Image (cartoon, rainbow, N blue to C red):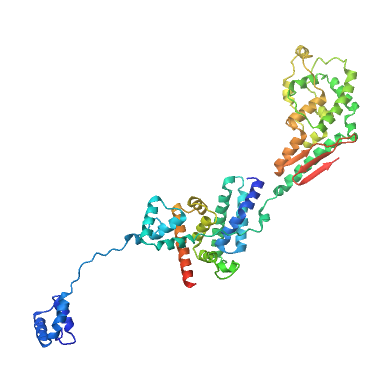
Amino acid sequence: MSKINLHNYEAYFLDRAEGNLTAAEELQLKAFLEEHPDLKADLEDFENIQLTKEEVSIPKLSLLRNEETGLLQKEHLLIASVEGALNAKEQKELNTLMEEDPNLLDELALYEKTKLPQERLPFADKDSLKKKQGKLIYWQFYAAAASVAAALLSIVLLNTPSAEPLYETASVQKFEQVARDSESANFGYIIQAEAPKKKSRPTQAVENSFAKVESATNQANKADRNQPPLKKLDKQVEFAELEQVEVEPKAKEAKPLVLPEQSVIAALPDDTEALESRKGKTQSLSLKEFAKETIQNELLKNKTVTQLIAEELASATNEKVVFEPASKANKKGLQFAMNLGSISISKK
Amino acid sequence: MTVKEYNQAVELFSDNVFRFVLKNIRDEEKAKDIVQDSFEKMWEKKDKVEGSKVKSYLFTTAYRTMIDKIRKYKKQGNWDEVSESDYAHSAGHHDLSEVLQEALSRLPEVQRSVVLLRDYEGYNYDEISEITNLSLSQVKVYIFRARKALKEYLVSIEHVI
């Protein structure tokens, strides 16, 4: 250190207060104070400086970070409050913080403002998203519609005068004759063994058709009523003949008629006696009755024609299909109407 | 799901899905495409979607479709970040809502999505987790960080004004 003078004496004073002067420097300081006694008071001031220990602490909570979100605990608590995600312990902690620092209320209000206000932004092209019923299955729709149209046309035609020749008495007589020729007059009896006990009610149109056929057949049967039944059953009875006479045109168009041939034959009595013993105990079905039953059982599955068509159409098109019953019938024909979704079909 | 139920879903949820996507990507045409795709995907899976899950299914599909499209467009260099003012009806910030929308547009995608699902649709953390395929913890963290960022933006704007 350089020799003490009026420019550096404070450094000497400080070092002396801290006990850092050498003996030589002490001697220099003493000689300097004798020359400048007014500075002795300054030296005493330096020596009187005493630093005392002070307990200083800052709120640790404000520095802590939340383990879950990594945010400052204070921020975490405020946001959790806005989110409604505070548990009881956190709520208590937040209350304490707010008591200590009222400014947190303002901060909480700011966090409340971060909630997005509801805003409406409508999607203008909703119609482009919607599916129109049946649109995706055009071919199914048209196929089903064609089937329905064919079936309904058949029903209508069968109930118009022009359809009557199909059920002329002559045709039925011809069949009856064939049956006797082949010694299968018990045909009706045999069929009855397989006939369903439960009968479903067909549509009015179908009933009309069968009624006409039945009427024609009854006339034909009158002449042959006294003829004895055949003693022997011919298993070669051709069911195709039955179809030619009895099956309605609509049934043929819809799908081939499958007759329970094996089960019918299996039910045949093995001998004439057994046949005779059963005769009279049962009621024979006429051929048209058999056809009617068969159509109902095998084709319609004990449903009406309209029920079946409606179900098939509904299944194919995913549309609600409603058939309205014929509103008016007259001598010339019938009227039908059908609603298929937004399409309405009617025909007299 | 029947055709009728599907069409009801269009009526009930297409606006919400559109808003969610538009607020995220800020491009009206792309948002419409994503909504179309989302509903088409739901139609393809209509037999597997339960009636009570329709909305959730739609948002999940829309979110994933949106993420896929953003990635695809970005890869093709065909993705322009559009600011809020480009599609908002008025430029400048006249009220809190506009300031918030601007703040929202500045958030990272994932934070923006979770906040939109939370505030607009009212989904809880579990539901958002299901829609975004994030963990419950991630959802919470993203929402908290987003709130902090939004609040800081509000404070900064207040200082500017």
At x 64%, y 49%, the residue is B8
Give coordinates of residue A337: x percent, y percent: 81, 40
At x 61%, y 45%, the residue is B47
In the picture provided, is A280 more to the left or to the right than A50? right
Q: Is residue A87 visible?
A: yes
**For residue A141, what is the image quadrant?**
top right
Tell which of B80 and B102 is nearer to you. B102
**For residue B25, what is the image quadrant?**
bottom right
The N terminus of chain B sits in image quarter: top right
Tell which of B1 and B100 is nearer to you. B100
Tell which of A41 and A204 is nearer to you. A41
At x 18%, y 85%, the residue is A8
Tell which of A54 and A70 is nearer to you. A54
**For residue A232, what is the image quadrant?**
top right
The answer to whether residue A78 is above or below residue A281 is below
Give coordinates of residue B97: x percent, y percent: 54, 64
Q: Can residue B81 be seen in this view?
A: no
Give coordinates of residue B81: x percent, y percent: 55, 67
